[in-house]
Image (spheres, rainbow, N blue to C red):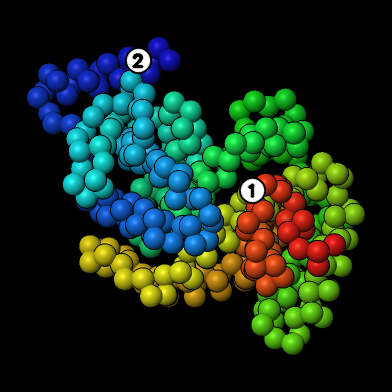
Amino acid sequence: MKLLFILLTSFIAFNVMNGQPAPEMRYEDKIRIREAISIANEFGDKIWKGINDVPFVLILITDSVEFLINHPYPSDDFMLSGKDSILKTSIYYRPKQFDKQFLATFPAVNGVNCIVVGTPENTGKSSTDWTITLLHEHFHQYQYSYPDYYESVTNLGLSGGDQTGMWQLNYPFPYDNNDIAVQYKKYSSALSKTIGVIDTKEFEKEFNKYIKERNKLKQLLKPDDYSYFSFQIWQEGIARYTEYKFLEQLSNFKPSSEMLQLSDFISFDKYKDDFYKSKVSLLEMQLIEEDKRLCFYETGFAEGLLLDKLNPEWRDIYLTDKFYIENYSSKFK
């Protein structure tokens, strides 16, 4: 904290002494953020009821400065950059504190859940990919904003006494257990085949095979390990699914002229097709002993699509019946 105060004081003093204006966000970043917010505002509630009531608060991390957008009450270490005409909100700034490769959401400023994200260049994403990723993170804001979310997560009893939340990344799931790795592969392969025939007469046969493999995996896992698996599917997998649901809504969406002019913009239709193919492909390619918790993103994406077929109303109970997606359809039993 003392070091932060010294750095902040030096930063302010340097600007004042040299008469420099406040730093400003790049035009391109403003355009991408505005596009994500516009998409969320237009289509969010069609996918998740109430998501548009959740503030789209964001910290953009550059190489040297962090910009805070849409925060209702910034902390004192942020200074006003100005009222922005593109984003239609006040932007605040401070010296960089977070890793510039961050793609995360957590209560980073005064207890408010913020999307904390590096620039497209620093996160290795195109303008289109980065914009859709902001919608993934906004969905996390939606999850975290539900009144009993944190209490429910605590009641899972998986933290091992960790109060920082890092257990969600570092939980000792038995990724390297050979029996579990082999069965996970059977389960994910069966899931991939089921998704591949979701609109054909082969669906029921493949779905039944998939359920058998999923239940075998469940039986191999200890109760806490299965709870962690289910939690990751519910939280990260359905966030990945949400990216795709937004892309489905964009088939007739006309991006802003400014977005279209970005040199690395990929049309949302093309991106949707590539997104789907890559995620289904990963179901077959990923190995849990190597890719670890990243596997849960793709399996959750696919299981979300299954739920759309089995129970189109499942999203209505997503926040009230948490963490075990098999509760959303009797056919999962």
Q: Earlier in the sequence, mark 1 or mark 2?
A: 2
Q: Is residue 52 left or right of residue 30?
A: right
Look at the image and tell me whether residue 68 can be seen: yes
Q: Which residue is mark 1?
A: 319
Graded by Cα atoms within 10 Å as few (under 14), some (14 to 19) or many (20 or more), the crowding at tag 1 reads some
Q: Residue furthest top?
A: 2
Q: Quadrant of residue 163?
A: top right
**Residue 264: quadrant of the picture:** bottom left
Identity of the residue furthest to the left in this view: 19
| Front-lying residue, 102 or 72 | 72
Residue type, numbered disc 2: Phe
**Residue labelled with disc 2:** 5
Helix, strand or loop for disc 1: loop
What amino acid type is highlighted by mark number 1?
Leu
> Is 59 left, or right, of 272 in this rendering?
left
Relative to 9, 130 lies left or right? right
Q: On screen, 194 above or below 311? A: below
Judge whether 234 appears above or below 169 on screen: below
Q: Is residue 121 visible?
A: no
